[in-house]
Amino acid sequence: MTKDVIALTPKMPEPWAVLAGLLSGGPDKLVDTTGEGAVVQLCDEQGRPLVSVEAPLLVQVEGEAERLLGATPPRVPFWWTEARATTGVPDAERLAGTFAARLTTLAGGTAWPPEAARSLGVVRTDGVSVAPTPAAAQPAVDVLTPNVAVVIMDRPVVAMTAWLSDAFRAAAAAERGLQIVTPPGTVLSPAMLANMPEWPSRWVVQDEREGYYDGLSGAVLRWQEGMFATVVSEDATEDDPRTPVAASYQEVAETAERQLALTYRTIHPADDRLVLGGSLETVWRELTGEPPAGWGTAEPANLPWSPGRLTDVAFARAPEPTWFVVVGSPERPGLATVRISRTKAGVEETVTLALGYGAGEEPPLDALPRTAEALATRHHLQSMLVQLRKARRDLLVPPRFEGPGVPLAFVLGSEEVRAMPDDRARRTPLAEQPVRLGPKTRPAYYYPLPGDPSDLSGWAVFERLMGHLKGS
């Protein structure tokens, strides 16, 4: 049985319905709150949490339950209520399931996974106890050591949820890494991948043959010195550690699916009238013919697309940086991460966008110059890199080797061009010369690059271009 149970209900759970769910452990079970009241916990006799229940989230975006859970939810808008059981306590898992079963019985809807929410009866937990603090202090964390916080997840997709984001921040504040352990069938959301901290944080995948391996590098792992760390070969040297790579990671299947990926940066003058998100909407419309479907500060993306509301959140959090996830419609898989920060130059947006295409679908490559010009002339573009890669249409990241993308184009904004001496931005050593974007007096440049996914020589051309633009 999974350790997470989620109720998807067509209407907001009434307080009495939540109370009925919380009584799944009997009337004498202790209840506590954390996270400034946003998390309610069912506790053991010592007050340590057995089940942590998140505040219900209103989801107004089509396709998020299908993307992250593979579940069929009620029609939007619907409410998403998560219950996370403490790992290693079977009674806690049954408590979470009974909580979700009671909630969906009273409020309608369905529970994920369906098999977890079949019983409405009281779960007896007399004498059951869980790990003492500090391991139980953070609801998302299952194991805490001096080096890392470990989260064990049994979900189809590891997403950048609010509680997992809290776990990242808590681990960073304590100068620990965060290691996420999953079964072999789990995949990562690209939003999660974009926020994965560096070593010793890892995505740890359980494997029948190797025990554990790193889902992003394939390195075989062992639990040693209070964390999952790479296995070192007997004949390793300091210069060549010869870390074994799991066979499961190397089992790569050919695919005709592709992803079009854009990474760009804009810097806007600081102004009270500034509306953020306009550059991303422009790109989305140029490449798909429609705006983004929704956005949020965590996954699931729960709010309908609105640059105005996104701007309000970013301004309210300033001068601290703000991170957003933006998603497309189910018909055209698309996901972007947006990081907004205040710098000396103004308000900076750093955007990474990926769009997925199946075997019979062609990415709109002819729209790229037009998209670049719109960014350069209307949205203060600094630079952009466009890549094409062989990867899943649904954009999810499997624990298998996926080849790198190849560069299709690089774009240099007008301010960057203006800062370069002489005519360096226009005259390059490449066979194909750049395309001027915008007016002659303040030009930006679009540099076409080789874009064959089977030919990695495009990176050599890209590096040659970068060396020329930097004057090296």
Image (cartoon, rainbow, N blue to C red):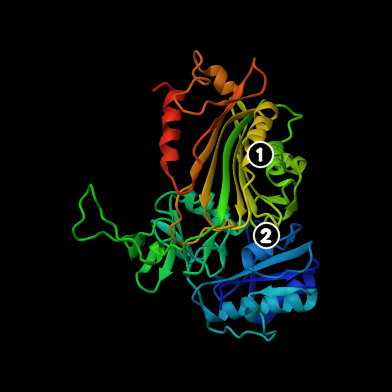
Residue 11 point in image, percent of width and height = 81, 67
- Mark 2 Cα shell of 10 Å, populated few (<14), some (14-19), many (≥20): few
Q: Secondary structure at mark 1?
A: helix
Q: Residue at x 50, y 13 (%)?
A: 422
Q: Residue at x 53, y 46 (%)?
A: 388
**In this view, 145 is above or below 341:** below
Q: Quadrant of the N terminus?
A: bottom right
As drawn, the residue found furthest toward the top would be 422
Residue 403 point in image, percent of width and height = 45, 52
Name the foreground residue: 125 vs 433. 433
Task: Look at mark 2 in the image and give the residue it sits on.
Answer: 38
Q: How many marks?
A: 2
**In this view, 215 is above or below 368:** below
Q: CA distance from mark 1 to mark 2?
A: 44 Å
Q: Amino acid at mark 2?
A: Ala
Q: Residue at x 64, y 78 (%)?
A: 97
**In this view, 2 is above or below 440:** below
Q: Residue at x 18, y 58 (%)?
A: 235
Residue 321 point in image, percent of width and height = 60, 39
Q: Amino acid at mark 1?
A: Ala
As drawn, the residue found furthest toward the left would be 235
Task: Look at mark 1 in the image and give the residue it sits on.
Answer: 367
Q: Quadrant of the C terminus?
A: top left
Residue 55 point in image, percent of width and height = 70, 62
Report which quarter residue 122 is drawn in. bottom right
